[in-house]
Image: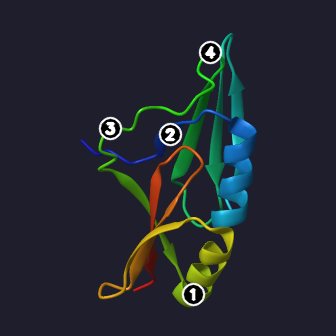
Amino acid sequence: MKFKMVHNNFNVSNLDKSLRFYQEALGLVEQRRIRGNDFTIVFLGNGESSHRLELTCNDDHPHKYNLGDNEFHFAFETDDIANALKKHKEMGVVCYENQAMGIYFIVDPDGYWLEIVPAK
């Protein structure tokens, strides 16, 4: 039996704001949208992999979600870590740098951490 990872989900409080963030910060664009009675789901991708980020926006939850200790993250690999870091610093979204490991994290509008790692 095999399993293939296909997407991760983040619940967001403001879909438009999140879509703008993910487009600008990581080049993710809308691949598919599902509209339910009281929610919207948008799948984002960038053509680099088949894995998607699913953003779910519940109409009756317009405030940020409680992320607890936020001890989870989604990682992105870049072929240009120096320019990526420069861009993300200009955006004001870098929340943690580990220079010894050559990685850093950015934070989305709802507080989710996204790890940026250099290509191997």
Q: CA distance from mark 4 to mark 1?
A: 40 Å
Which amino acid type corresponds to the residue marked 1 in the rendered image? Asp
Question: In the rendered structure, which disc, 4 or 2, sits on the residue that comes first in sequence?
Answer: 2
Which amino acid type corresponds to the residue marked 4 in the rendered image? Asp
Numbered disc in front, either 4 or 2: 4
Q: Nearer the viewer, residue 114 or 27?
A: 114
Q: Do the residues bearing badges 3 and 2 touch, measured as CB atoms within 8 Å?
A: no
Numbered disc in front, either 3 or 2: 3
Question: In the rendered structure, which disc, 3 or 1, sits on the residue that comes first in sequence?
Answer: 3
Quarter holding the C terminus?
bottom left
Q: CA distance from mark 2 to mark 1?
A: 26 Å
Residue appearing at x 46%, y 46% in the figure = 6
Residue 115 is situated, as x and y percent measured from the top left of the image, at: 43, 66
Alpha-carbon neighbours of circle 1 within 10 Å: few (<14), some, or many (≥20)? Answer: few
Circle number at residue 100:
none
Q: Secondary structure at mark 3?
A: loop
Q: Which residue is mark 3?
A: 68
Residue 91 is situated, as x and y percent measured from the top left of the image, at: 67, 69
Q: Secondary structure at mark 2?
A: strand
Residue appearing at x 32%, y 38% in the figure = 68
Circle number at residue 10:
2
Q: Do the residues bearing badges 3 and 1 touch, measured as CB atoms within 8 Å?
A: no
Which amino acid type corresponds to the residue marked 3 in the rendered image? Gly
Q: Secondary structure at mark 1?
A: loop
Q: Which residue is mark 1?
A: 80
Location of residue 80 (image quadrant): bottom right
Q: Which residue is mark 4?
A: 60
Q: Do the residues bearing badges 4 and 2 touch, measured as CB atoms within 8 Å?
A: no
Q: Do the residues bearing badges 4 and 1 touch, measured as CB atoms within 8 Å?
A: no
Residue 66 is situated, as x and y percent measured from the top left of the image, at: 41, 32
Location of residue 62 (image quadrant): top right
Alpha-carbon neighbours of circle 4 within 10 Å: few (<14), some, or many (≥20)? Answer: few
